[in-house]
């Protein structure tokens, strides 16, 4: 009776009509008064469900009970280059007020677009139709969009304080495969450097003005730039993201559960060392093909 909302994010559906949430209701004997349903948008469904739960808990309509967010998927691919990125996972998140990890609804930015990088048009086949090259570009574009506006929002909400990749203690990224996470994290430093160049500020070490002024689309497949960004961000990646990334290295791709698995990995590894102390911040980037993405911040 302590649970009043159950949100499920999954693209591994049990039925084309019946919500997976209804299947989980068998776990709540005697409690039929539970709002929520299944949310579907590739790997983003779990984050959409989380934002729904956050909105409910902070609203005037909240009745004092907990919300539970379930993100669960089987990541299966047909034979070919994508198959090594398969995996499976499920995570349940308890949401309520006065939590040890705090979400501020003003500290988030979302990207939404219509692209066909990954989709499942045939319900008789469990495998998706994937354009891997396009999907990586969409991931980069979504990250750039939400990261830029996320930093601007934090600046506006915190008396003009400048925010960049160094402003957060830890990061959690959606992890379809770990090489993409590392390359994408490096791009945050590239975006920071581009912003400084545009505003006439001193360019960070390791960058040249020419690489910061070229059209952004030309940088997505620039292997030389990738090498520079990996070097520039290597130490920060190890400190801020490698702990969150560890679980996905062991489990593989988990679709909607990915960022939640990353958060659990961060809590286990960093919290286990006693370093996840009050005041620390975690920036989370969630991406789902199709495409939807959100970057938000949690504070300890």
Image (cartoon, helix red, strand yellow):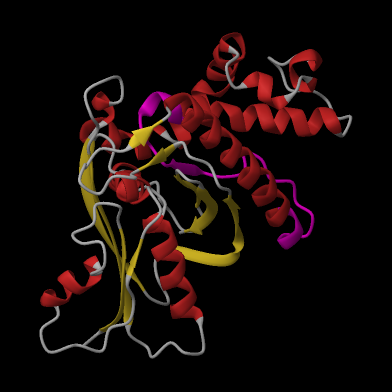
Q: Nearer the viewer, residue 37 or 107?
A: 37
On the rendered image, what quadrant is the C terminus found in? bottom left
Say if 157 sits above or below 1 in the image: above
Residue 197: horizontal and vertical position, in percent?
82, 27
Residue under the point 67% across and 19% down: 218
Location of residue 198 by image quarter: top right
Location of residue 204 by image quarter: top right
Say if 35 sits above or below 46 in the image: below
Number of numbered discs visible in the structure rendering:
0
Say if 28 sits above or below 83 in the image: below
Q: Is residue 153 magenta?
A: no
Residue 208: horizontal and vertical position, in percent?
76, 13
Residue 9 shows up from this direction: yes
Q: Nearer the viewer, residue 255 or 55?
A: 255
Is 150 on the left-hand or right-hand side of 238? right
Residue at the right extreme, as displayed: 200
Extent of the magenta region:
155-181
Residue 77: horizontal and vertical position, in percent?
24, 32
On the rendered image, what quadrant is the N terminus found in? bottom left
Location of residue 125 by image quarter: top left
Residue under the point 30% across and 25% down: 82
Residue 142: horizontal and vertical position, in percent?
57, 41
Residue at the top extreme, as displayed: 224
Say if 106 sits above or below 41 in the image: below
Is 173 on the left-hand or right-hand side of 214? left
Q: Is residue 158 magenta?
A: yes
Residue under the point 36% across and 49% down: 263
Residue 271 shows up from this direction: no
Is 234 on the left-hand or right-hand side of 275? right
């Amino acid at each position: 009776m302590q649970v009043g909302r159950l949100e499920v994010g999954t693209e591994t559906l049990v039925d084309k009509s019946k919500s997976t949430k209804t299947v989980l209701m068998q776990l709540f004997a005697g409690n039929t008064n539970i709002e929520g349903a299944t949310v579907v948008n590739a790997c983003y469904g779990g984050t959409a469900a989380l934002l729904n739960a956050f909105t409910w808990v902070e609203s005037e309509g909240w009745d004092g009970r907990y919300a539970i967010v379930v993100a669960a998927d089987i990541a299966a691919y047909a034979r070919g280059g994508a198959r090594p990125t398969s995996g499976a996972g499920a995570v349940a998140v308890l949401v309520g007020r006065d939590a040890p990890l705090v979400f501020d609804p003003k500290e988030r930015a979302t990207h939404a677009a219509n692209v066909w990088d990954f989709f499942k048009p045939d319900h008789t086949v469990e495998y998706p139709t994937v354009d891997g090259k396009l999907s990586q570009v969409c991931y980069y574009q979504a990250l750039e969009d939400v990261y830029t506006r996320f930093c601007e929002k934090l600046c506006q909400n915190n008396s003009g304080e400048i925010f960049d990749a160094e402003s957060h203690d830890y990061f959690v990224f959606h992890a379809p495969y770990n090489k993409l996470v590392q390359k994408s994290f490096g791009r945050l430093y590239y975006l920071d450097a581009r912003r400084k160049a545009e505003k006439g500020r001193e360019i960070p070490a390791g960058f040249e003005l020419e690489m910061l002024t070229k059209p952004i689309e030309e940088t997505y497949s620039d292997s030389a730039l990738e090498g520079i960004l990996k070097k520039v961000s290597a130490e920060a990646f190890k400190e801020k993201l490698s702990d969150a990334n560890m679980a996905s290295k062991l489990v593989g791709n988990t679709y909607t559960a990915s960022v939640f698995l990353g958060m659990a990995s961060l809590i286990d590894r960093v919290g286990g060392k006693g370093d996840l102390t009050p005041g620390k911040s975690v920036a989370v980037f969630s991406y789902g093909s199709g495409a939807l993405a959100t970057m938000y911040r949690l504070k300890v």
